[in-house]
Image (spheres, rainbow, N blue to C red):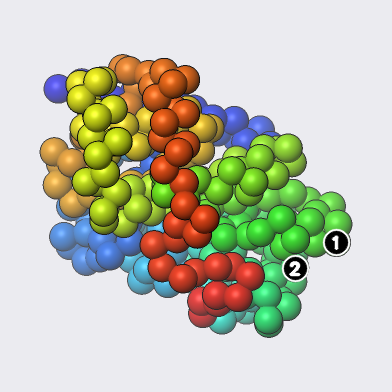
Amino acid sequence: MPVVHVPQIRLNDGTDLPAVGFGTYRMNGSSGVEGIISAVTQGYRLLDSAFNYENEGAVGEAVRRCGIPRQELRVVSKLPGRHQRFDEAIVTIEESLYRAQLDYYDLYLIHWPNPSKDLYVEAWTALIDAKKRGLIRSIGVCNFLPEHLERLIAETGVAPSVNQIELHPYFPQDAQREWDRKHGIITQSWSPLGRAGQILKDPLLQAIAGETGKTIPQVILRWHYQLGAIALPKAASAERQLENISLFDFELSPEQMQRIAGLAREDGRTFDQDPARYEEF
């Protein structure tokens, strides 16, 4: 079976990312390595990890064993909240690379702003420095609100290339996505399938799946793509991995997109993780 070809999205620093990626949360150890290799075999070239997932080693092993040249892959990790001070952040990035046994990360993100600690600007300066040193190709953030992003840009003059946020049809984050777009920041979607919960049984999405001859996950992930957001679905089985990446042979109509927009809830977060107050270390 031919590998799915995934379009590329250009970042504000001139680098590219695939328009859909593979989430590796809880993919650890040898089974994690095999699952990640399977995803690469299906056509995924963007692998999303984090220091706190404790699987950077598994990701690195999969990169070495998958048979795809390193330069064709985009490997991502994230700085945990407990290491946002400048010196600690630099050491953590170095440790991330040692764990993965990689020479560089294609993208490195601040995992959460943790605003009560007021260290995210300091952490951002560390990522800027690490990029200058060649440890990272692109830098970005996760779960940053406009007020956090405004501070980063105002105090450092450097805008993130990516803002990775919770995003799915019940929580489409219209205002945040528009803010990112206006400032040249690409939005990535974590939990793009709503943690595979009730959303996968939604009658409206089921109807659109019937209209398109696709599955509900494919409809949702195509919705992300048409919004300009890079979804990061996770799946252990090769069958589901292939299903999730097979988005580029159909299109949702404007009317279908509008119907999906009607699913938005005032606060559709799957858990109470508002970055204005939620913090992770």
Tag 2, which secondary structure? Answer: helix
**Where is the N terminus found, in terms of image quarters?**
top left
Q: Nearer the viewer, residue 89 or 236?
A: 236
Q: Nearer the viewer, residue 46 or 235?
A: 235
Answer with the quarter of the image where residue 21 lies: top left
Q: Which mark is residue 121?
A: 2
> Residue 111's spot in the image, x, y percent?
54, 65
Q: Which residue is located at x 42 percent, y 49 percent?
A: 170
> Residue 50's spot in the image, x, y percent?
44, 63
Q: Which residue is located at x 39 percent, y 62 percent?
A: 270
> Residue 276's spot in the image, x, y percent?
63, 70
Whether residues under marks 1 and 2 lie with C-beta atoms below 8 angstroms apart, the answer is: yes
Mark 1 neighbour class, 10 Å CA radius: few under 14, some 14 to 19, many 20 or more: few
Q: Which residue is located at x 68 percent, y 81 percent?
A: 116
Q: Which mark is residue 61?
A: none
* Mark found first going from the N terminus, 1 or 2: 2
Give the residue at mark 1.
Answer: 155
Answer with the quarter of the image where residue 69 lies: top left
Give the side of residue 65 with respect to residue 94, left or right.
Answer: left
Tag 1, which secondary structure? Answer: helix
Q: Which residue is located at x 35 percent, y 53 percent?
A: 194
Give the side of residue 203 with respect to residue 120, left or right.
Answer: left
In the rendered view, tell whether residue 6 sits above or below residue 111: above
* Residue type at numbered disc 1: Glu
